[in-house]
Amino acid sequence: MKNFSGNVLFLDRSDINTDEIIPAKYLSEVTKALLKPYLLEDLKLSGFNPEKDIHGKSVVVTRENFGCGSSREHAPWALELNGINLVIAESFSRIFRQNMFNCGMMAVELPKAVIAHMFSAFSDKETRIESDIEKSSFIIQSGDQLEEISFGISSFDRDLVAAGGWVEYADSHY
Amino acid sequence: MGKTIAQKIFDAHHVDSPSEDTYVIRLDAVFCHEITTPIGINDLVKRGKDRVFDPAKIKVVIDHVTPAKDTKTAIQGKMLREWARRHNIIDFFDIGRNGVCHALFPEKGFVRPGFTIIMGDSHTCTHGAFGAFAAGVGTTDLEVGILKGVCAFKYPGSIKIDITGCLREGVYAKDVILAIIGRIGVNGATNKVIEFTGPVVDAMPMEGRMTLSNMAIEAGATSGICLPDMRTVEYLWDFIKDEYDSREAALEAFNQFASDPDAEYDSVIQFDVARLEPQVTFGYKPDQVKSVREMQDTKIDQVYIGSCTNGRIEDLRIAARVLEGKKISDGVRGVVSPATSHIFSMALEEGIIKIFMDAGFCVTNPTCGACLGMSNGVLAPDEVCASTTNRNFNGRMGRGGMVHLMSPATAAASALAGHITNSRLFQL
Ligand code: SF4
């Protein structure tokens, strides 16, 4: 199973689309590894600098409808290659969310108010999230400020994460 | 309680439910193109699973960048070609016989009412115009589709959009869908199917229905479905005439999936188009929509007519009616890409290509081209394109470029004027 804990990258915007996560011009790559340097290259978010801000982060926390737009699985791959296996948002586009679990990664939805709280309490400082998948909870921590947040994912999503993705799951089940 | 068309299709294709509302469904077709498939093929090979569930149900095209523009895209084409050959996939469409996937596959008769279809392409929802459940998926879903012929979805809830009124002259399916997305938002149908119904849809040719369904994803929808009717049967007749005694018999068979009158919808939206004016987007999201009148005089550098949204013969005919005998503005580059080879030859025969060329347009071969900024009309930073495509995302047609989405009629009129403007077909 992948690592779902680490430092948090806060992206304070809704509707971040897949062209922003990984621009179409890189879709001609047939090797995943080459996507790594281009994550969030075209993100429209004031003050965001992909070269500085992504480094060392393992979890993304963002707002509504993350990953809308194209079906490209290059978006989760680009995240994964940068060590980010967990995105927490108010909501996701269907395809992006499915792609994450299909790759054995996690896209977890939390209520708007909880996300808003995470932003207001933590987004301006260095923050870590520890995931406990069995207990369905996150520990979010910055300095001596520490909170536990519980989340829900379906048993099927859990199985996909455990199996390492949908290809292995489907080939052994169908 | 009755069921929607999407639910009936799911029931008829159900294989397994690994968790309560997850449905693993059997697929009738898996479509593939050269951008998202090769990386999946690589992965399957690496896993020692280089197999296909049924070569006859896999349809393959090279469409996004064709002819190849560089070594990388040439390799993508080569991988797809070799894979199709190695697995005896007969329906493989290479340059000279190819076209934009969502225009080509219906034209070849690969879609039927009641079908389940996936493709590694978000605009796969286009095929819902035929009363199919068709959804875009990522590479892993595509791999499993290729390998096992199944895909997992949530059991679908639907939003019914009942489109009433009478479209004014100069107002088209594209204006309708832009206005709908403007109303419900880019997230308005996430995880749901949009069912388009009502007299406006009934009166639309299949081309218009495909334009509607094509952009369902821009409101977040899994699929956009139109109920099959006599127009659907008529469009498919050449491909199905050996299977049914008559058109009526075909329609009766297709109607087994039609939504029940008491089907339950997550919501029902009444959309009256009687006063609808031509629409255009203004920002970087497809729900940022205004009337053309409000955007009048926005200067443009390029006009692009093509794509799976509006590169069909109907679209070219409409644009040609606006352009006939006129010249596009000096400051504007016009690019038209007929969506398939067949559309290209029809346009040639009908004199449409000549009209475009006389007006000063560059005519390209069938390809996705400028639509996704990979070839054939990439914008320079700060350039503006009036486009008949479906996405105005930041950077979509080239870094720093701005895309305004609109109908072919509006795009053609804007090409003549040099700025965004209403077509002469539309009298206020
Ligand atoms: S024309 Fe554009 S939207 Fe349609 S399949 Fe091609 S790239 Fe995608």
Image (cartoon, coloured by chain):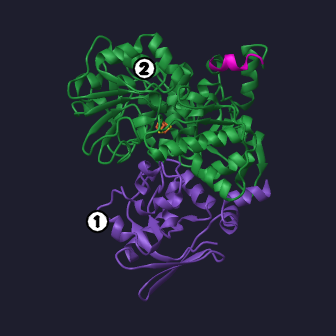
Chain colours: A purple, B green
Direction from residue B93 to residue B184 in the image, left or right? left
Q: Main secondary structure of the magenta part?
A: helix
Q: CA distance from mark 2 to mark 1?
A: 44 Å
Range covered by the magenta-colored residues: B235-242
Q: Is residue B37 above or below residue B98?
A: below
* The one of B337 and B253 positioned closer to us in this rendering: B337
Please state the horizontal and vertical placement of residue A121, each as a whole percent of the image: 39, 77
Q: Position of B15 compared to A59: left or right?
A: right
Q: Can marks 2 and 1 be said to lie on one chain?
A: no
Q: Position of residue B256 (x, y in %)?
A: 75, 29
Q: Amino acid at mark 1?
A: Gly
Q: Is residue A166 above or below residue B4?
A: below
Relative depth, front residue between B161 and B311: B311
Element carrying mark 1 = loop
Residue A90 visible to the viewer? no
Residue A25 in the magenta stretch? The answer is no
Alpha-carbon neighbours of circle 1 within 10 Å: few (<14), some, or many (≥20)?
A: few
Q: Which mark is residue B60?
A: none
Q: Is residue B241 magenta?
A: yes
Residue of label 2: B316
Kindly tell me whether residue A126 is visible in this rendering. Answer: yes
Q: Along the line of sight, which residue is nearer the eye, B335 or B10?
A: B335
Label 2 or label 1, whichever lies nearer to me, is 2
Subunit bearing disc 2: B
Kind of residue at badge 2: Leu
Q: Quadrant of the N terminus of chain A?
A: bottom right
Query: What is the chain identity of the residue bearing mark 1?
Result: A
Q: Position of residue A170 (x, y in %)?
A: 74, 56
Is disc 2 surrounded by few (<14), some (14 to 19) or many (20+) residues within 10 Å?
many
Residue carrying label 1: A47
